[in-house]
Amino acid sequence: MNANSSHRRRIVRFSAAMSVICAVLMPVGPFVLFFLALLAPIDTLAAMAGVAPLQPGSVDAADGARLLFGIFALASALPLSFGLIRLAACFGGFARGALFAPSTIAGLRDFAGAMLVWTLAQPLFRAAYSMILTFGGPEGSRQIVVQIGSDFILMSVFALCVLIVSWVLTEASALSEENAQFV
């Protein structure tokens, strides 16, 4: 009995801490990406996008590309930020002891859905980054980079697994409520 209650207290403390961490990361993350894109050297941004750097001397194009890159970086982080908001709600439910409450499970489901949307959008954003950074270059040097790697596959599988787990939890919760009515 005592081990069970100490285990539950650890879950509550960990969930409360994770709820705060998610709530803090949510508004900060997209803006950090935006400002990093504004402050990073254009060659660094080009390397992140997987393209050759802009031609020397195209300062105006580099400044415009940096701003547009920052806007796209901000936009690409929005689904993940929404997911963190919903994950914070899920951890808040865990911290309150409402492990199988519909709102807790919905938070987990929404997090998984946002993670899946974010993951599936990454190749599109990478293609946009490459177009933005090479648009100012001479004809023949413009590039579109489409990259699907193991990280894309792993994140997609992870998001789908969490989505399926949330679906199973929803069904289990509904079944538990139905069984409780037959007492």
Image (tube, rainbow, N blue to C red):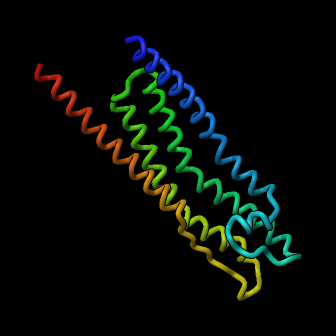
* View extreme (bottom): residue: 140
Where's the N terminus, which quadrant?
top left
Please tell me whether residue 156 is drawn above or below residue 176 in the rendered image. Answer: below
Q: Where residue 137 appears, x then y in whole percent?
A: 76, 80
Q: Position of residue 8 (x, y in %)?
A: 43, 20
x%, y% of residue 59?
A: 86, 70
Q: Is residue 133 left or right of residue 8?
A: right
Q: Position of residue 82 (x, y in %)?
A: 52, 44
Question: To which quarter of the image does residue 17 belong?
Answer: top right
Q: To which quarter of the image does residue 136 belong?
A: bottom right
Q: Residue at x 60, y 33 (%)?
A: 21
Judge whether 21 appears above or below 48 on screen.
Answer: above
From what the image shows, is residue 9 above or below residue 115?
above
State the quadrant of the C terminus: top left
- Residue 96 located left or right of residue 33: left
Which residue is found at the position 81% from the left and 55% from the top? 39
